[in-house]
Image (spheres, rainbow, N blue to C red):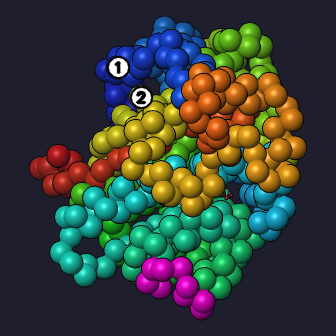
Amino acid sequence: MSEMEKSDLIQQQQGHRLSEDSESDDEVVESVARQPAANVADDRGMKRPNDDSDDDDDAGQTPAKEPRDNATVVASHYNKLEERGLYERSKSRIFYMRNFNNWIKSILINRYLDRIKDKAALGTPLRVMDMCCGKGGDLLKWIKGNITHLICTDIAEVSVEQCEARYNNINQKNDQGGKPFTAEFFAADATLQRLREKYRDPSIDLHLVSCQFAFHYCFESLKQAEFMLKNAAECLKEGGYFIGTIPDANEIMKRQRAAGGDSFGNDVYKISFLCDTEKPPLFGAKYNFQLDGVVDCPEFLVHFPTLVKLALKFGLRLVEKKRFDEFYEESVSSGRGLLEKMQALETFPGFSRDDRERQQNREEYRHAQQYLDRKDGRHTKVGTLSKSEWEASTLYMFFAFQKMKKSWDKEGKPVYS
Ligand SMILES: C[S@@+](CC[C@H](N)C(=O)[O-])C[C@H]1O[C@@H](n2cnc3c(N)ncnc32)[C@H](O)[C@@H]1O
């Protein structure tokens, strides 16, 4: 990174006053599917750009001490993850939470594809990049979204191969109710390698870049965060969107504070901090995330105000962000059909043997029982998630950035408006 770029970032950071602090405190959510959500959402504890501490000028420089190591751990972890069949998945402790998260992704992807389609002439080709595509968990969403071309990339080679095999399978059958699309696949570290150079057509312009449950890996260092943002932004058309889902650092810090130790969690997830929790650094704020025997990986807090500032440098303007609980609340009435189809909530009391077994843990479903009690027999069933699954899912938030109009200043530098 050049000195100019460093000072650029530091200036941006110093000028920033963490307007995010306005997020609502002590919010109590109560609903059918919702748990009494934990309370305060603010930036407490994240090291501020203008904190007076000794290593302030590291804001951007905090190079991770072993950058390759974390990436290698993550790639090999995901490479080794076995694909489970529906039967096995349905027995998982987090079956409904995974469906719920999938539902959130579907609503998010549809919302932004619709915005793009609304502005485009009928029949315009729709080109998308699924950055950190994993094993292709979103392929059906792209089919249903009637896109024309998809670029799939991920650091984990085995996952990319499985994603491609899945695509071939779906495309051959062509029974998913959408039009088949063309696609390309390659493995790359999106935080260190320029993806554009690997596209079949490096001059392609994209309408949408989607990065689901993965962008936070780049907050290991400023360099990696900038690289990933550049990868997301550089081929986006003006007006195109960069969307993603990440753990909400405010929520994580709030729960860490409440737990009063470096580790916290519940029956399905566990977070163990591997950095100073009093003043986590802006980059490299590392923790280990475990999820029901499926995930066990180092991750990094994303200081959202810093992300917003950095994104501007690449012509990306924040247009929307919401925690999953807020998004659920906003989308549940319009997305109810899909919610049911995707089995994104568990019926309480359960019908199936698996559900009934799960629900023997009364404490995990007390909120659902209380809801039915309040209804005084007028409702006999309710859709919900177990307490632990809800707590794990509401660690997350989504974001959407829009690519701004680009022009050039007298010195030949890009200016976005
Ligand atoms: C939780 S999975 C999400 C997969 C997929 N986006 C989904 O929603 O199903 C996170 C993915 O990010 C990928 N990943 C992590 N770090 C990466 C990096 N530096 N470059 C590219 N992919 C990365 C992992 O290999 C993994 O497939």
Residue pictured at 21% horizontal, 48% vertical: 416
Rate crowding at label 1 as few (under 14), some (14 to 19) or many (20 or more) other CA atoms within 10 Å: few
Mark 1 C-beta to ligand 1 under 8 Å: no
Say which amino acid is labelled 1: Ser
- Labels 1 and 2 touching (C-beta < 8 A): yes
Amino acid type at circle 2 is: Pro
Residue 5 placement: quadrant: top left
Report whether 316 appears left or right of 366. left
* Residue 371 to residue 399: above or below: above
| Local secondary structure at mark 2 | helix
Magenta region: 171-180
Residue at x 55% of width, y 41% of height: 246
To which quarter of the image does residue 83 belong? bottom right
Spot occupied by residue 279 in the image (x, y as percentages of width and height): 61, 14
> Residue beneath label 1, please?
19
Task: State the SS at label 1.
Answer: helix
Residue 98 is labelled as none
- Identified at 48% across, 75% down, the residue is 143
State whether residue 139 appears in this view. Answer: yes
Q: Of all residues shown, which one is farthest toward the front?
A: 377
Could you tell whether 145 is left or right of 183 in the image? left
For the image, the number of numbered tags is 2
- Expressed as whole percent of the image width and height from the top left, the position of residue 68 reads 72, 50
Quarter of the image where one finds residue 205: bottom left
| Residue farthest bottom in this picture | 172
Dividing the image into four quarters, tell me where ligand 1 lies.
bottom right
Q: Nearer the viewer, residue 95 or 371?
A: 371
* Mark 2 surroundings: few (<14), some (14-19) or many (≥20) residues within 10 A: some
Disc on res. 305: 2
Q: Can residue 228 be seen in this view?
A: no
Residue at position x 50%, y 67% from top?
A: 141
Q: Is the magenta stretch mostly helix, strand or loop?
A: loop
